[in-house]
Image: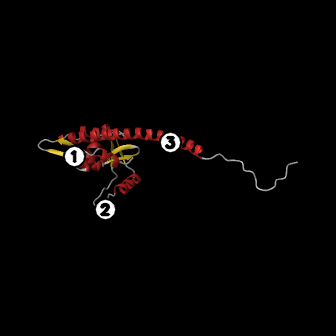
Amino acid sequence: MQLDSVLDYLHISLVMPMTRSRSVIPVERIASRIYVIRGESVMLDSDLADLYGVSTGNLNLAVRRNGRRFPKDFVFQLSTKEFESLLLQTAIAKGRGGRRSLPYAFTEQGVAMLSSVLKSTRAADVNVVIMRTFVKIRRVLATNEELARKVAQHDRQIAVLFENLQQLLTPPATKKNPIGYIHPKD
């Protein structure tokens, strides 16, 4: 499912309290950075670093230093093929000054664990907004799956009705008498 319909549904902004001022992070900004890779909803290290206000290198360094907190099901590195596919989907230019290594993808649990590694108030506040976005996306997807199931059931019922209606509307084949003289069978 495309995240565009999810973004339409989530067209609200969450107000994130900060220390001195209030900063608004739109849910759309977070939801547009959630990708489905290897069947998991994930966020890339560069997107998380941007939201947390740290460099991608520092974020990855904190993850490496706390490796026990990030098992393979919390964070994984994209393959070259996955990264190229992602570049094509998101239309990100890979010119000079870009990434020199493949990005890391953080699952929802990995994002939650990041707040314990990045010990700043901004990281904690941003993490709350990201977690709420993941929950809302999960709810929307569950609702869409339920609707898809109901539509499929109704489609089957409509197909059966249509077949029965076609049978009723089709006149029965009548046996026609041939024109001309027919020799009786011996």
In this picture, residue 57 sits left or right of residue 146:
left
Q: What label does residue 95 carry, if any?
A: 2
Q: What label does residue 158 carry, if any?
A: 3
Q: Earlier in the sequence, mark 3 or mark 2?
A: 2
What is the x, y in percent for residue 161?
53, 41
Of circles 3 and 2, the one toward us is 3
Classify residue 134 by image quadrant: top left
Classify residue 142 by image quadrant: top left
Q: Residue furthest front?
A: 180
What is the x, y in percent for residue 150?
44, 38
Q: Earlier in the sequence, mark 3 or mark 1?
A: 1
What is the x, y in percent for residue 156?
51, 41
Q: Amino acid at mark 1?
A: Ile
* Residue count near mark 2 (Cα–Cα under 10 Å), binned few <14, some 14–19, many ≥20: few
Of circles 3 and 1, the one toward us is 3
The residue to which callout 1 is attached is: 25
Cα gap from disc 3 to disc 1, whole angstroms: 45 Å
Residue 72 sits above or below residue 100 on the image: above
* Residue count near mark 3 (Cα–Cα under 10 Å), binned few <14, some 14–19, many ≥20: few
Residue 97 sits above or below residue 44 on the image: below
Cα gap from disc 3 to disc 2, whole angstroms: 53 Å
Q: Amino acid at mark 3?
A: Ile
* Residue count near mark 1 (Cα–Cα under 10 Å), binned few <14, some 14–19, many ≥20: some
Q: Is residue 67 visible?
A: no
How many labels sit on residues? 3
Q: Residue furthest right?
A: 186
Cα gap from disc 2 to disc 1, whole angstroms: 28 Å
SS label for mark 2: loop
Residue 93 sits above or below residue 161 on the image: below
In this picture, residue 175 sits left or right of residue 23:
right
